[in-house]
Amino acid sequence: MPVPPSSASVPRTERFVFLLVDGLSMMSLSSAIEPLRSANRLVGQTLYEWSLASIDGEPVSSSSGIPLQARKLDELLGPADYVFVCGGLRLDPSREPTILSGMRRAARTGAIIGSLSTGSYLLARAGLLDGYQCTIHWENLPAFTEAFPHLMCSSKLYEIDRDRMTCSGGIAAMDMMLHLITMRHGAELAVRVANQFHHERIRDTDDDQRGWRDHNHASLPRGIRRAVEMMRAHVETPVRIADIGPAIGMTSRQLERVFLRHLNMTPARYYVQLRVERAHEMLAYSNVPVADVAIATGFASPSHLARWIRRSYGSSPTELRSAQPRS
């Protein structure tokens, strides 16, 4: 039940503005807003306020096609303490300049700047992540790091670095907001909010995302996990399978045996498949030239990559890329 306000000093209301981009993820947006709403209800005070914005004040459609009413961004910047850009599907390049300008204006107000999901791309292109630790959804991470090699991008669920807050999206947005509630109003309230959503454990900035098959690897033998970690660390310049076993204390024959037993494929096939998946992510979520994708994923040539992409996905890299939805 809500707790009525006490006679003690009432905390200052903090104001969030969520800048919506066509194709935004409703899951990420809801996961960010609902903890704020619940915190208000539980304490019986307006700890947080939030507004939905678009660059021109026109409605914005989410990735699920649901239209969201929004106010013009510039009308909301004055009192805003936080401004988050909410990403989703790939953005139409023609719309990008106005969004980047809007986020730069938001940063000049002194507000804390943040992103949900692929919104990190927009902050990076606006130059607002230079010198900051950041993160992005694991599907987009290879393409992001290829496009912005100078940025310090991690695979964490979310990153909070001074006046920047970036989130990998989805339910991770709830964890980030629960962390913020903890910092402002204490862990007890954050736990109460989490319980409202059956959120059993509040994950923090030390928690990694669980993409690229991680959910399948947790219970695998340590030798396989170490081999996979080595493969992931050497995607652009693949190491020889013959060198992986000795590096982790196994013979090549032992390594092949455990891979066949637990993953039903040889280490060599797994390694190629991992690199093909990484290439697929770069093709789907970036405009990096196919030749550069081939180099970044350790393939000898674009044609070599194309053969594996067609074999795995039934289409060429160009066809795969053109099939991706754009907002």
Image: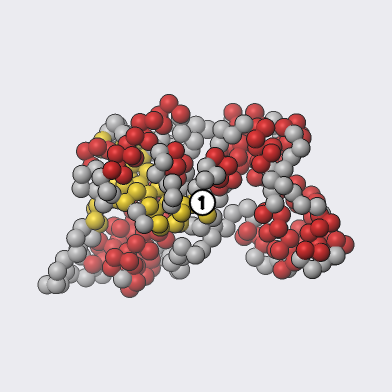
Residue 262: image x %, image y %?
Answer: 77, 62
Look at the picture and state if 244 lies above or below 74: below
Q: Which residue is mark 1?
A: 153
Residue at position x 31%, y 34% from top?
55
Q: Is residue 97 visible?
A: yes
How many residues crowd mark 1 within 10 Å: few (<14), some (14–19), many (20+)? Answer: many
Position of 80 with respect to 33 (left or right) is left
Residue at position x 39%, y 30% from top?
97
Q: Residue flagged by tag 1: what amino acid is it? A: Cys
Position of 266 with respect to 114 (left or right) is right
Residue at position x 65%, y 45% from top?
278
Q: Name the outermost residue toward the top.
A: 94
What secondary structure is marked by label 1?
strand
Residue 316: image x %, image y %?
Answer: 69, 30
Assign the N terminus to one quadrant of the image.
bottom left
Q: Name the outermost residue toward the left.
A: 7
Quarter location, residue 221: bottom right
Look at the picture and state if 312 lies above or below 8: above
Position of 207 with respect to 279 (left or right) is left
Between 201 and 277, the residue placed more toward the observer is 277
Residue 53: image x %, image y %?
Answer: 29, 40
